[in-house]
Image (cartoon, grey):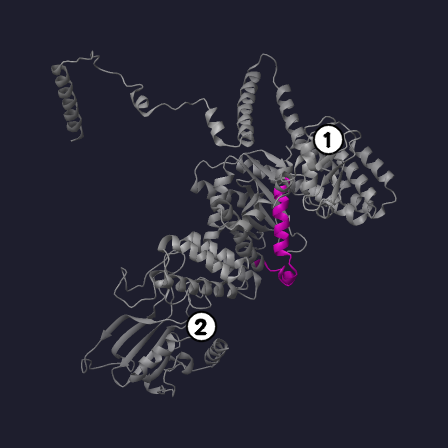
Amino acid sequence: MLALNTRASEAVVYAREMDVVESVHDLAVQNPAEEDFSAADLTWTKFGTAERHDEVALIPYDRVDAFIIGECSNPECPTRFHIERGRKRAKDTLKEYKTDEYLEYKLYWCSFGPENYGEGGGVLPSRKYRLNTRNRAARPQSMRGCTCHFVVKRLYAQPTQALIIYNERRHVNKSGFVCHGPLDRDAIGPGAKKIPYICNEIQQQTMSMIYLGIPEENVLEKHIEGIQRYCGSNPKVNSLASQYVHKLGMIIKRSTHELDLDDQASIRMWVERNKKSIFFYQDSSESDAFILGIQTEWQLQQMIRFGHRSLIAADSTFGIKRLKYPLCTLLVFDSRQHALPVAWIITRSSAKPDVAKWMKALLGRASSVEPGWKISGFLIDDAAAEIDPIRQDIFAIQDIFGCPVLFSLWRVRRSWLRNIVKKCGNIEVQREIFKRLGEIVYSIWGGVDTLSALEELTHDLVDQTAFIQYFKASWVPKIEMWLSTMRALPLASQEASGAIEAYHVKLKAKLFDDSHLGALQRVDWLVHKLTTELHSSYWLDRYADESDSFQNVKEEYIASTSWHRALQIPNSSVTVDDKDHLFARVSSQKDNNVTRIVWNPGSEFAFCDCAWSLQGNLCKHVIKVNMICENREGYQPSMSFQAFKELLTSLWKKPMDDSVGLDLSIAWAHQMLDQIKQLVELDSSKTIGTVVNNMPLKWVSKKGRTSIGIPSSVLALPSSSKSGSNNAVARKKSQKRKRLSRLR
């Protein structure tokens, strides 16, 4: 309340229309009754000329200290002021002088500045080097670029009075942002110099736990465990750490996405403030579309680590109907093959020039950190776009990343299954429709006439009016395009699809919470949620897994995909109908009385009666049944394996017999076969030792390694005589002296 009153009083003072005063004699001396007072308690006057003037106030000289104490006690920005520059003049040294001429001149600057102006840094004009003798802020890190400063002149003509000239009254940095105090989200508070060393990892861990809503007691416990690795156990350290966690929590709770009431202006301010987390930004104009590419330093590290010679996937067009701008997420597959977000792109444009802009910027950023960084494949999943955007995305990816493009079926499957369940009430009809649609998709390698199959499907389901209308309107016009795309591009596996789907579901749960529905049309809100809660969640997941801490977080992270949940189901819990291949039963691990039925087993378009599957998701029961069926006769292989088989077959058919093309194909096929064998061996082996032992490279002893390949200039027979040994010693000393002489 006090802060609001202070801002209101300052606004009233600034709002007053005042004439410019040209003489100090026209200023009234102000002497507030309070023991300590601040700028808000004074009336400020424009002094100078109409072209150039300052905001000034005249007070008794003996009240200057009371004014400085009041300014230091500002509730919004508590601080200290130090004398940055000072000059004195003896009495009776000026024969002619102006009314504002000084006897003493002191420039006071906020102690939270200005060594660091934010991006780029900077120093005071009067300071060519850093002074350590000043009474500065709590610690060097607190020199946060504050530009607040004022001048105190003890008047030459009236030594009992002081003229205060306020050059910058706001505690902001050069970019105009609050840079310290309770309103600064990055500030830690006074007394920070006593807080023990806190590395970036511990600070990120603490921030992630606070963002995720973990109770402060648990956050403090983990925080103290972290700093004790550096400082040991100390009651004083624990007390200061408690203050640190509490203040950090207050800063996070006070942070807001609305930096400005206007969403576009707010985003510009956020971009200016977070340049290190942005790899591409293009503001909207008449000719350019809005594009914002976000990637934190941690995400960049993960993309370089897990994306090099591996895959990148795109969860595209998220929130196309509910958000102001759709969200595209680039994902890599981490050490557990879980989808990890490494970049967010917020834009409505899918034109090839715009897509190429942010893709080139992203590739350039990775290459600047890791020269030679390259990906092996790019997965796309856009089930809502038309043929032209799809082709443009494929061309842009191939031109920029120089890698093949794979297609993931999970969005198509999800969209079909959700609408089948929603528009058809009979579960037997739902199973039949989903099975027939799957047969149409599988027929892309069988030469079946798609249009005839669709006509037969609509004829057989003529009574399912709601679904048929939806399918004819949304999918029939572009079904040929989708099937040709699936036929032309390699298809992603169920594990990859399940990982992308798990990220999509988590993102949806984070963003489409009922409490945030009013903010969906603000881009700054979306950016805030992505860079705080979602980023913290994935950071903590990876940290818990790699450090083997936060066991509950690690267990949830491991079981976050349907593929990993399927691996926990024992084979004995699955019963397959080998006679007619109609269904399979999966017994529940938690309740022996519950059994799930999977219809159309062995297909990506299998239908399960569990709640997760009925929501359109790829459930663990379907994946587990397909794992069992792939090793049994009578079941067709997965679509990704069929696409792989078709690719190999096309390579085998292409070259002419007894041609150079055949030689190249053989070389490429052998190279690819060796890589596949290594991947299979790594995936199937339980320990890396078995793989290392099978490698052709055999290590030898150190002595043998140093002697191999070094010719001996003298072949001497071993001698047992004393003279022979003396000659050998002399020879060694002579060689040593020669080497030393060369070095000199």
614 lies left or right of 505 = right
Amino acid beneath label 1:
Ile
Residue 485: assigned label: none
Camera-nearest residue between 180 and 162: 180
Q: Is residue 145 left or right of residue 410?
A: left
The relative height of residue 157 versus residue 435 in the rendered view (above or below) is below
Can residue 734 be seen in this snapshot?
Answer: yes
Q: Amino acid at mark 2?
A: Glu
Measured from the top left, where is residue 741 in percent x and y?
Answer: 15, 28
Which one is nearer the viewer's eye here, 113 or 132?
132
| Circle 2: element type | loop
Q: Residue furthest front?
A: 592
**Up-down: is 473 above or below 687?**
below
Q: 179 or 25, which lies in front? A: 179
Whether residue 212 appears in magenta in the rendering, the answer is no
515 part of magenta stretch: yes
**Whole-percent x, y for residue 720 in the image:** 16, 13
Camera-side residue of 76 and 547: 547
In this figure, which residue is indicated by the disc labeled 1? 444
Above-or-below relation of 454 to 165: above
Horizontal relation, residue 95 to residue 524: left or right: left
Dominant secondary structure of the magenta stretch? helix
Secondary structure under badge 1? helix
Left or right of 16: which side holds 34? left
Label 1 neighbourhood size at 10 Å, few (<14), some (14-19), many (20+)?
some
Q: Which residues are magenta?
A: 497-523
Residue pointed to by mark 2: 76
Upstream in sequence: badge 1 or badge 2: 2
Answer with the quarter of the image where residue 231 lies. bottom left
